[in-house]
Image (cartoon, rainbow, N blue to C red):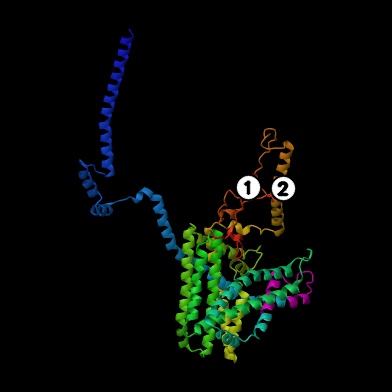
């Protein structure tokens, strides 16, 4: 019985061995086939039939096939239509920049010309009328009324400043200054000219504040508490500023005159190349609309100032050559070269700034509307500033020092002798008055058109914001944000020792909406883009950032931006 069982088990084991051998034998051909496929795809050959596949693969990777593929390869731009449309619009924007920019430059040039001619034409007449009123009013017995209106007081102060500064400028020897500068080396003169440009901007930024402080100190109502040092100190500071600024512009004009009269014109070339360095310093910065508006105003002022400096250079050179007309044609190519380089630099600079910052070319029309609004608002009954002063604040162009220098150069270059010369001067003065009146009429009409196109008529009747109310509102706005976080922290301390352990027992604090900035009609016109939403206000007591204290900075209207307002111009 045991032998039969053992023989049965042995037979079953032999059958299992035979079955496994058959399975392994059937699996080997499949592996061989798979390996052959792998070797074919990888380009390897075995001893039997790999040479044919190698030849076929080498034929596919031939140089002719590669060149044929490169020549016949195609693609479809319409698969990314939005991207290429945007690129085309950028090209069109760059092509529109010269036209739109020059429209703004021409309009701004005539605005500066109007403010500049005002100093020579209407300001002397207004000063004479104010002095006549000051003399005749006490004789008429009208003691109850004011002797002079605030605008007349400002005109008289401007007249006195011009007279005193001209008497001081008469002691400055232009010829000695010219030869002193001419004796310097070219590199030293280049450095001096750059320093003068920086100093001119600093003088302009602080000079208008000095003049405004003088005007307000002289016309401030007597009922208010005195919070100033007096009219006379402010007047002396204004006289000193106008004299120093005029002297600085004289040195700048003398340096330019030396560059024109140099034999090899190397200094003039170096000074012109300084304009192209300006592209490097401004193109690769992040600009918003307000920043670009400031730069546009600066370019308008710089271009007008350069025109006056070139006029002074031509007057001095014509005097040295006894007013020979032939010498004017000698100076003409250099003058055109300086002006052309200035225009080319402005066009390239604004074209790339608008390209890199995705600003439309239509923004220059909005800039014209803002400048036009200043002119129209100065003609209103409730105007709070003279137009020449508003141009000074907006563009940084102060006409008093430049006008003083031009008077000094003209008086030293032109000799007035005899009655015929006085008649010519009188006719020239009447011609300047005519030019001023015509320019003002055309500018006023054009400005009204720009204001209507921008839908800004309603702002003309808005009262100017008072300084006291804006100061109180800003102070309340600031204290409200500072004290919000400590109150929330004290409430959390009363609820439990830990915020995370017993969060359900804390009383829920309703989220108070952020104080909304009152929006006027000006917010719909040329406002800066909103700031990033991750801006946080840091609590002054804890030094921590509060998520509930997020405050988006209020939008700034272009009408509130002048030449020297900080608008967040930062380098990326």
- What residue lies at 60% left-to-right and 88% top-to-bottom? 176
Q: Which mark is residue 483?
A: 2
Q: What is the distance, in whole Å, between disc 1 and disc 2 at their CAs?
A: 14 Å
Of 432 and 568, the residue lying toward us? 568
SS for tag 1?
loop
Q: Is residue 189 above or below residue 535?
A: below
> Along the line of sight, which residue is nearer the eye, 74 or 360?
74
**Position of residue 26 measured from the top left corner of the image (x, y, whole percent):** 26, 28
Asked whether residue 128 is in view, the answer is no
Where 533 falls versus 123 (above or below)? above
Q: Secondary structure at mark 2?
A: loop
Q: Position of residue 97 (x, y in %)?
A: 46, 63
Compared across the picture, whether 225 is left or right of 369 comes to right
Q: Which residues are magenta?
A: 134-162
* Residue receiving disc 1: 550
Say whether residue 391 is visible. Answer: yes
Taking depth in this image into account, of 137 and 167 the one nearest to the observer is: 167
Q: Position of residue 240 (x, y in %)?
A: 69, 77
Classify residue 44 by image quadrant. top left
x then y, percent, for residue 358: 48, 57
Find out whether residue 137 is within the magenta segment: yes
Position of residue 443 relative to residue 128, above or below, is above
């Amino acid at each position: 019985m045991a032998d039969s069982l053992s023989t049965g088990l042995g037979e079953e084991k032999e059958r299992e061995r035979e079955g496994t051998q058959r399975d392994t034998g059937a699996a080997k051909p499949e592996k061989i086939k798979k390996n052959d496929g792998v070797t074919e795809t990888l380009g390897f050959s075995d001893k039997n039939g790999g040479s044919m596949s190698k030849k076929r693969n080498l034929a596919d990777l031939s140089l002719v096939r590669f060149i044929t593929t490169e020549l016949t390869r195609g693609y479809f731009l319409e698969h990314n239509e939005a991207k290429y449309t945007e690129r085309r619009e950028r090209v069109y924007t760059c092509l529109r920049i010269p036209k739109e920019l020059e429209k703004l430059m021409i309009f701004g040039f005539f605005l500066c010309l109007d403010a500049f001619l005002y100093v020579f034409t209407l300001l002397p007449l207004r000063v004479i009328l104010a002095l006549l009123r000051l003399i005749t009013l006490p004789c008429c017995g009208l003691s109850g009324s004011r002797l002079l209106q605030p605008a007349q007081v400002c005109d008289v102060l401007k007249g006195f400043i011009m007279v005193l500064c001209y008497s001081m400028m008469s002691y400055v020897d232009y010829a000695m200054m010219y030869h002193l500068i001419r004796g310097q080396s070219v590199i030293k003169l280049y450095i001096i000219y750059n320093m003068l440009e920086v100093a001119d901007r600093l003088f302009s930024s602080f000079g208008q504040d000095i003049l405004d402080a003088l005007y307000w100190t002289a016309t401030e109502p007597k009922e208010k508490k005195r919070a100033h040092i007096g009219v006379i100190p402010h007047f002396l500071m204004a006289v000193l500023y106008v004299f120093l600024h005029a002297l600085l512009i004289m040195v700048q004009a003398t340096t330019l005159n030396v560059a024109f009269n140099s034999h090899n014109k190397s200094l003039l070339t170096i000074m012109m190349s300084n304009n192209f360095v300006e592209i490097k310093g401004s193109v690769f910065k992040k600009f918003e609309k307000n920043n670009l508006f400031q730069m546009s105003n600066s370019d308008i002022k710089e271009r007008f100032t350069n025109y006056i400096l070139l006029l002074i250079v031509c007057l001095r050179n014509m005097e040295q050559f006894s007013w020979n007309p032939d010498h004017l044609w000698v100076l003409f190519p250099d003058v055109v070269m300086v002006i052309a380089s200035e225009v080319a630099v402005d066009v390239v600079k604004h074209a790339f700034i608008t390209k890199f910052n995705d600003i439309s070319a239509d923004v220059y029309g909005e800039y014209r509307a803002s400048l036009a609004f200043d002119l129209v608002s100065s003609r209103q009954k409730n105007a709070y500033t003279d137009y020449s002063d508003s141009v000074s604040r907006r563009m940084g162009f102060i006409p008093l020092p430049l006008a003083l220098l031009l008077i000094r150069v003209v008086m030293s270059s032109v000799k007035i002798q005899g009655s015929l010369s006085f008649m010519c001067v009188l006719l020239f003065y009447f011609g300047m008055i005519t030019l001023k009146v015509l320019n003002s009429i055309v500018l006023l009409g054009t400005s009204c058109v720009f204001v209507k196109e921008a839908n800004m008529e309603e702002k003309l009747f808005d009262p100017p914001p008072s300084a006291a109310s804006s100061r109180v509102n800003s102070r309340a706005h600031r204290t409200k944000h500072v004290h919000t976080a400590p109150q929330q922290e004290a409430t959390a301390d009363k609820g439990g020792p830990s915020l995370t352990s017993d969060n359900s027992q804390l009383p829920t604090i309703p989220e108070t909406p952020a104080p909304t900035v009152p929006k006027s009609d000006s917010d719909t016109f040329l406002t800066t883009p909103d700031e990033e939403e991750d801006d946080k206000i840091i609590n002054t007591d804890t030094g921590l950032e509060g998520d509930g204290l997020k405050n988006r900075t209020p939008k700034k209207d272009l009408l509130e931006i002048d030449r020297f307002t900080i608008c967040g111009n930062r380098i990326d």
